[in-house]
Amino acid sequence: MSRLITLNMYMTLDGFGEFPEYPGSEIEEDEPSDFWKELWISRYDSVDTIIFGRRSYEGHAQVHALSKRKLTDPKHLYDYSRFLERCKLIVFSNTLQEATWGNTRIMKGDLTDQVEKLKKEPGKDIIAEGGPSLAHDFITRGLVDEYRIFVMPVIYGKGPHYWGTMPKQETLELMDVKKMPHGEMIIRYRSLR
Ligand SMILES: NC(=O)c1ccc[n+]([C@@H]2O[C@H](COP(=O)([O-])OP(=O)(O)OC[C@H]3O[C@@H](n4cnc5c(N)ncnc54)[C@H](OP(=O)(O)O)[C@@H]3O)[C@@H](O)[C@H]2O)c1
């Protein structure tokens, strides 16, 4: 069976890839939230490859490299850094010359061709982590097998948008919906092909 590609999305109700404040969003959790479990912890055994756009990769390297962790960080963030550093990290970029964090490969060229090649390589499942510009390309090119969407209770009106014009309809099967304590939702869909 081919490697499953899950797209992680973090968006406002109107589809923007931003992290605005809302009542409850400022609370820092010592224990992992349902959102964190669903998007990350539940995948640690079945995933060994993470795909980023260049900006998302640079942001993650700054914040989530094991060498950047702070003594006050909770255990689940240390576990996350260790997971990322066990994985193959793929960064899509036409400008990046060198990547020094973890086991990183820089990819360029046609996204569909590159992702199809990646799916044929031996390995476990794949998470496409974004950011929104790369996620948008995954969606509009029909490259996503499963969506895990964290929706914040905010109509924001600006920022990078995930959704775009589709060459043809994509029909989804709803797999799960979870309601979070501060009005967020976690929605899982699978693409019907
Ligand atoms: N998971 C996340 O990281 C996440 C989630 C939600 C919101 N955000 C927010 O979103 C912002 C970053 O937005 P973004 O959408 O610009 O980030 P991004 O998708 O990570 O990075 C965009 C860059 O990735 C490369 N790229 C994207 N699509 C490509 C393709 N099809 N082929 C080759 N290269 C491709 C290009 O790099 P080159 O210019 O090097 O060619 C492009 O400039 C940040 O402010 C962040 O806070 C991030």
Image (cartoon, helix red, strand yellow):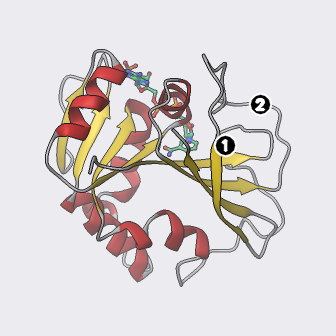
Tell me the residue at 33%/69% (across/down): 44
Tell me the residue at 79%/46% (across/down): 13
Q: Give residue 106's position: percent from left, percent from top.
A: 22, 30
- Relative to 133, does residue 3 appear above or below in the rendering? below
Q: Please tell me whether mark 1 sits on a helix, a strand or a loop.
A: loop
Left or right: 74 with respect to 171? left
- Relative to 16, does residue 79 appear above or below in the rendering? below
Residue density around tag 1, few if under 14, some if 14–19, many if 20 or more, within 10 Å:
some
Give the amino acid at mark 1: Glu
Tell me the residue at 66%/23% (across/down): 164
Residue labelled 1 has its Cβ within 8 Å of some atom of ligand 1: yes
Front-lying residue, 182 or 38? 38
Give the amino acid at mark 2: Lys
Say which residue label 1 marks.
18
Residue at the front extreme?
193
Residue 58 at least partly seen: no
Front-lying residue, 115 or 171? 171
Front-lying residue, 20 or 83? 83
Say which residue label 2 marks.
158
Q: Are marks 2 and 1 in contact (CB under 8 Å)?
A: yes
Quadrant for residue 187, please give it.
Answer: bottom right
Q: Give residue 179's position: percent from left, percent from top.
A: 75, 71
- Relative to 144, does residue 117 appear above or below in the rendering? above
C-alpha separation, residue under disc 2 versus residue under disc 1? 8 Å
Labels 2 and 1: the sequence-earlier one: 1
Q: Give residue 100's position: percent from left, percent from top.
A: 17, 41
Left or right: 80 with respect to 186? left
Residue 164 at least partly seen: yes
